[in-house]
Amino acid sequence: MKNRKIIWTTVAVAAVAAVTTLLLVRAHRLRLLSLRQVVIEGAVVQNDPDVNRQLPIANVAVTATVDGKSVTTRSEASGYFKVVLQRSVLSNAPVAVSFRHPSYVPFDLSLQSKRPGSLNKLYIVRMVPVQTKKMPAGPNTPAVTVISNLRVRYTINSRTETNVGSAVRTFQVVNQGNVPCNHQAPCSPDGRWKASSGSLTLDAGVDNSFENVRASCIAGPCPFTRIDPGGFIHGGRKITVSALDWSDTATFLLEAEVYHSEITSNVRELYPVIFGGTLNFTLPPTAEGVSLEAEVNSAPMVFPLGPDLNLSWATCTVETSAGQEKTQVYRCGLKPGYKF
């Protein structure tokens, strides 16, 4: 018996040791993997001494290269970028990061790190716009189109409930009191007396619903009745009231308010904020039919944005905020030949 206990104890200790070893090996491998990862993240904005003009730059090609291996990504509408690549654990080679966009001067970074996992920093890259040569004014100089008096127009759809009336109905449950039940359902709640049940169903109609439904006994031996609210307590298009009577005939009253439901569209307007050649505005997530109203060389026009955000005089992007409000953030930059 003693030898058996020793054997089982030895087996248990060996099992624990094996599991511990496996966990340590796995943790070591994960640590080595994390050390080999190079994570570079940040944002790309336009270089300008005025912070209000440091606008995010989307679609910038961001390429990170280390140990001869490259990974490329593109900046989002907010300017955010993130690059994840691997390199040798013992490598001390610098990480070369390039930023390329046809409208901006190329930008390069050389990041040195003795430990591959130590590049823990947010990199804000400010790119300089490409300077276009200004042609001297002359008879053949293209005219600049002026965009003015800008407004954003959109609609918000909402469901409204309108009280269009009420419903009042009575019904009876016929029964004779003082008749023993003898286990023939329906019976009174205590099982002594024979009972009768009755119900009334109402339909409010299409796009209508009942609310604030009330049911009560109004005549007869009401103390010996019971109303089941399960069929009307939550309202709705159809409601049913059921009643149980274990004495003489009783009368019941059903009352409810009738509401009509419909979708209404409210047109709203706002004025965008303009910094330099870029306009900015935000919209709630329920906004539909977004368009820009503007005067083009003093002529009023309406420009529907549509799902592709197409504008003849600007390039627009939209992103949804990460918070619970899910706000839509719009940015539109002027194309060459236009000005605000």
Image (cartoon, rainbow, N blue to C red):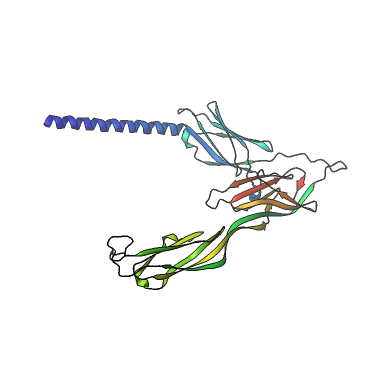
Q: Is residue 114 visible?
A: no
Residue 84 horizontal side relative to residue 11, left or right: right
Q: Decide which of 335, 103 is in the foreground and name it.
A: 335
Q: Residue furthest right?
A: 139
How many circles with numbers are drawn on the protein? 0
Would residue 188 appear left or right of 251 to someone viewing this image?
left
User: Can the viewer see residue 220?
Assistant: yes
Q: Position of residue 332 (x, y in %)?
A: 68, 47
Q: Position of residue 233 (x, y in %)?
A: 44, 62
Which image quarter is the N terminus in? top left
Q: Is residue 329 left or right of residue 231?
A: right
Please give left or right for residue 310 compared with residue 199 in the image. Answer: right
Q: 202 or 112: which is nearer to us?
A: 202
The residue positioned 39% from the left and 31% from the top of the image is: 29
Residue visible at 49% across and 40% down in the picture: 120
Q: Position of residue 221 (x, y in %)?
A: 36, 73
Residue visible at 47% across and 35% down in the picture: 117
Residue at (51% x, 36% y) in the render:
39
Q: Position of residue 136 (x, y in %)?
A: 83, 42
Which residue in the rendered view is the most extreme toward the left?
Answer: 1
